[in-house]
Image (cartoon, rainbow, N blue to C red):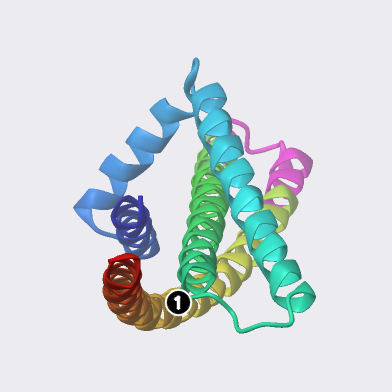
Amino acid sequence: MIQLLFMVIFSEMAVIMVLSFKTPFRKLVIMGLDRLKRGRGPVVVKTVAGTVFVVMVSSVYSMMEIQKRWVGDDGPVSSTDQVLMVRHLLEATLMGATIFLALMIDRLHHYIRELRIRRKTMDAAKKQGQGSNDKKPDGFDKVKSLEEELMTLREKLKQLESDMEAKTKQINAAEVNTVALRKQSEGLLLEYDRLLEENESLRGQLQSLDRKLSRSDSKKNL
């Protein structure tokens, strides 16, 4: 499951990078997202997101239960609990990053569509204003109102571009956080492997002690 979450995160990062820059792949990704948001697509996406969220909450709850056992027990912490704690923490972190990146993709796609619609509206208003000026020289008031509408649309376009720039900065910050999470997860995986080796070593020592005790008991019985 951890490998699958890593693949999902890297795929979401690639989609964000494609949407951030104007490339031929950007249109394909936008078309794919448009089709995904039609029909049963939103229901499927919400179902998957809800399932991931429930599993993340379950992992967080398991970590809280393990922490309660650590606080309640006076003895040393078992290596099994440590391994489970690290695994649940890694899974919860990856699932949270997956949901966050999915929300970023959704918002970025929404702002790109709004920007395209505003540009088309502005171009249509500009063409309509030019046609009215050519066909009706006496319609000065109508041309003036169209110019005012055009100015309003330009202001909205500037506002959308500023919002787009702010969202791009947020995406860059999210990518930096994702890289940090990836480094943290790699460290957690190394810690997880080390704890597994310690757990196997402790099991081997316990088995050897059991064998020695069984042999000593058999000798005493003889």
Does the magenta segment cover residue 156?
no
What residue is shown at x 59% (from left), y 79% (from top)?
77
Residue type, numbered disc 1? Leu
For the residue pair 11 and 83, the one nearer the viewer reads as: 83
Q: Quadrant of the C terminus?
A: bottom left
- Looking at this rendering, what residue extends furthest in the left direction? 24
Which range is magenta?
A: 132-147
Residue 183, above or below 50? below
User: Depth check: 84 or 117 in front?
Assistant: 84
Q: Residues within 10 Å of mark 1 (few under 14, many from 20)?
A: some
How far from the left and from the top, in percent, is residue 81? 54, 68
Classify residue 145 by image quadrant.
top right
**Nearer to the camera, 186 or 101:** 186
Q: Which residue is mark 1?
A: 181
Residue nearer the viewer, 76 or 37: 76
Measured from the top left, where is residue 216 in percent x and y?
31, 75
